[in-house]
Image (cartoon, helix red, strand yellow):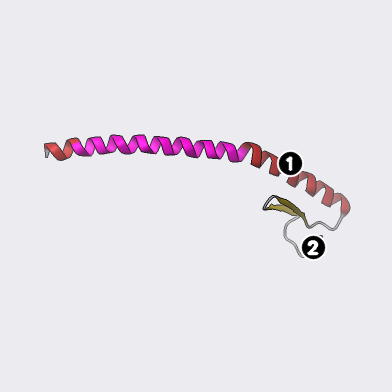
């Protein structure tokens, strides 16, 4: 819905695109922008972030295991 008081031209909420521009040409341009941004984010950015988070979690487990080995060695020698 067009809204003169909105601080945004448009946004995506829960998979729906909301356009707040009153001017038809600005509204169409905003729709294009929001659609492209949503597609790039949902199909490229989010999967990459998820993959990186998985890699970070895997590395955290390795680091924790190594730390525990070192702590065990020191605790036996002290």
Q: List the residue tagged with mark 1.
A: 36
Q: Residue 40: x percent and y percent? A: 68, 39
- Residue at the far front: name it: 15
Quadrant for the C terminus, please.
top left
**Magenta stretch: includes residue 51:** yes
- Who's the residue at 30% across and 36% down the image? 65
Quadrant in the rendering for residue 74? top left
Instruction: Tell me the tag on residue 3.
Output: 2
Q: Residue 20: x percent and y percent? A: 78, 58
- Who's the residue at 77% across and 65% down the image? 5
Q: Residue 48: x percent and y percent? A: 57, 36
Quadrant in the rendering for residue 1? bottom right
**Magenta stretch: includes residue 71:** yes
Are circles 2 and 1 on residues that touch, CB within 8 Å? no
Quadrant in the rendering for residue 45? top right
Stretch of the chain drawn in magenta: 45-72
SS category of the residue bearing label 1? helix
Relative horizontal placement of residue 68, taking residue 37 as reference (left or right): left
- Who's the residue at 36% across and 37% down the image? 61
Q: Residue 35: x percent and y percent? A: 75, 44
Which badge, 2 or 1, is on the more N-terminal residue? 2
- Who's the residue at 16% across and 40% down the image? 75
SS category of the residue bearing label 2? loop
Relative horizontal placement of residue 16, taking residue 58 as reference (left or right): right
């Amino acid at each position: 819905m067009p809204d003169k008081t909105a601080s945004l031209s448009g946004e995506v909420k829960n998979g729906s695109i909301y356009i707040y521009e009153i001017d038809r040409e600005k509204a169409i341009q905003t729709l294009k922008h929001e659609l492209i941004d949503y597609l790039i984010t949902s199909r490229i950015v989010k999967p990459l972030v998820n993959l990186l988070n998985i890699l970070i979690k895997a590395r955290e487990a390795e680091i924790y295991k190594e730390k525990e080995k070192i702590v065990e060695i020191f605790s036996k020698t002290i």
